[in-house]
Amino acid sequence: MDRTFWHTLAHEMAHYYFGTALVATGAYRWFFNESMTEYLALKAIEHRSGQPSLADWIRRHLQNSARSVHWSRLDELEAAGGSPSDRYDYLAASAAGA
């Protein structure tokens, strides 16, 4: 398995716990669910491939994200009528350039 497949598999398996077995509530529940599943996916990469591989994964992911994602602050989205309680609203507002 390559790292991308391993990362995706670990991330989605972590959703079994964070988002299914443990359901967060509150305005930032999606942030909690996604950040915890991503953390566990990164720990799985580190465990399987080592610290240098993890550092390379993070560096490449940050470079790709910086080039391809428009980031918006949650308070700016709230002011524009967006809802921080739902990640899909956040992603839609980010894609629209809010």
Image (cartoon, helix red, strand yellow):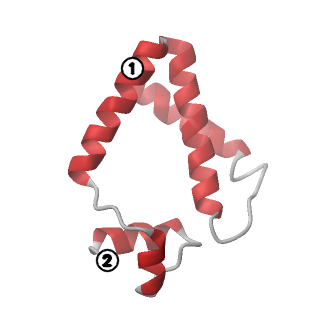
Q: Dot 1: within a 10 Å radius of its alpha carbon, few (fewer than 14), some, or many (20 or more) residues? A: few
Left or right: 85 in relation to 57: right
Residue drawn 27% across the image and 73% down it: 97
Residue 27 drawn at (x, y percent): 65, 71
Q: Quadrant of the C terminus?
A: bottom left
Residue 7 drawn at (x, y percent): 48, 30
- 56 vs 80: above or below: above
Q: Is mark 1 on a helix, strand or loop?
A: loop
Q: In which quarter of the image is the N terminus?
A: top left
Residue 86 drawn at (x, y percent): 55, 71
- 52 vs 58: above or below: above
Residue drawn 75% across the image and 57% down it: 23
Residue drawn 33% across the image and 30% down it: 59
Nearest the viewer among 52 and 15 is 52
Residue drawn 28% across the image and 75% down it: 96
Residue 29 drawn at (x, y percent): 65, 62
* Of pointers 1 and 2, the one earlier in the residue sequence: 1
The image quadrant of residue 56 is top left
Type of amino acid at the residue the image marks with label 1: Asp
Residue that numbered label 1 is attached to: 2
Q: Which mark is residue 98?
A: 2
The answer to the question of whether label 1 and label 2 lie on touching residues, with beta carbons closer than 8 A, is no
- 49 vs 85: above or below: above
Nearest the viewer among 79 and 60 is 79
- 51 vs 16: above or below: above
Type of amino acid at the residue the image marks with label 2: Ala
Q: Say if residue 64 shows up in the picture.
A: yes
Q: Report the mark closest to the observer, 1 or 2.
A: 2
Q: Estimate the spatial distance between the alpha carbons at disc 1 and disc 2, rounded to whole Å.
A: 35 Å
